Amino acid sequence: MANAPKSTTISKESSTASNLFAVLVIPICIVIGILIFKFVLGDPNNFIDNNSANGPKPGNYGGMAYKGGPIVPVLMGMLLMVFVFSVERFIVISKATGAGSLDAFIKKIQGYLASSNIEAAMSECDKQKGSVANVIKSGLKKYREMEVEANMDTDQKCLAIQKDIEEATTLEMPMLEQNLTVIATLVSVGTLTGLLGTVTGMIKAFGGLATSGAPDQAALANGISEALINTATGIATSTVAIIMYNILTSKIDKLTYAIDEAGFSIIQTYASTHK
């Protein structure tokens, strides 16, 4: 338990770094989206007579996306956010998993526990590294402390080991879920922003048709097509966000399950060997 203040400090530093990362990434992604919109999609070569004031060239999706309006760069920024935050979470989860296979690591720990070789189990944690190994090593240290504890019965010692594992998990695991809220938010915000762009585009298209005085089916169809670019981009953003969110949460659940499995083995081993 003497290591608890250090773990808390590390957790706070990691949390601060993660929050700073989110604060910086969000505006940077929006700015990059605006730059792509202006200089790539808005390239004059994408439009008739090389003039961005004209309609896009036939089959030119870059020019068509540019005509989608000012909501498009925001959506592009959101899509970029999904990719950036997903990569960042993959890196964090990979570090938490450790150096080798998590399943093989848990099996080794269980094997050492079955033979009551606590030192070898702790050495394996040092080799594995990562959040999962840190939590398990904390439980193993408590296991060793309880072996020389004379003022508690077996049930109390098992509860002490379990409490230590839970405290270590509380310190290590919450960092894995940071920034997942951003991805989860983009699932719904992406679609809603796309619909907003479509609605404003439709209003603009029908407003222009109303003031022209004569029905122009080609102009109306072109306006609706440009408006629907927003919906397509928004749906794409939400789709990628949902997929990445589910993949990341399943990986976190796997880590949590591994900790629970190893923690149960530690407690059961102690209870069976100290009846």
Image (spheres, rainbow, N blue to C red):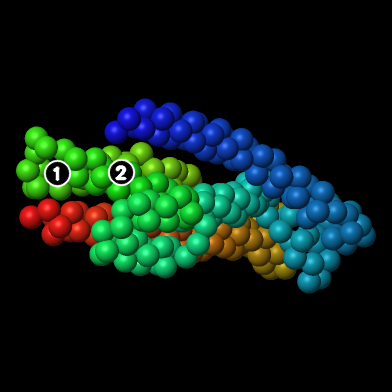
Q: Which mark is residue 202?
A: none
Q: Secondary structure at mark 1?
A: helix
Circle 2 residue:
141
Image quadrant holding the C terminus, namely bottom left
Q: Residues within 10 Å of mark 2 (few under 14, many from 20)?
A: some
Quick check: 38 left or right of 249? right
Instruction: Identify which residue, 269 or 227, lies in the foreground.
Output: 269
Name the residue located 8 percent from the left edge and 47 percent from the top edge: 155
Tell how many labels. Answer: 2
Instruction: Identify which residue, 243 or 11, lies in the foreground.
Output: 11
Image location (x, y in percent) of residue 116: 26, 59
For badge 2, the amino acid type reads Lys
Q: Residue furthest bottom?
A: 59
Image quadrant holding the N terminus, namely top left
Image location (x, y in percent) of residue 3: 36, 32
Q: Which mark is residue 157?
A: 1
Residue 177, visible in the rendered structure: no
Image location (x, y in percent) of residue 239: 51, 63
Image location (x, y in percent) of residue 76: 65, 52
Instruction: Identify which residue, 63 or 190, lies in the foreground.
Output: 190
Name the residue located 43 percent from the left edge and 35 percent from the top edge: 11
Name the residue located 11 percent from the left edge and 37 percent from the top edge: 150
Quick check: 43 left or right of 76? right
Residue 171: quarter of image: top left
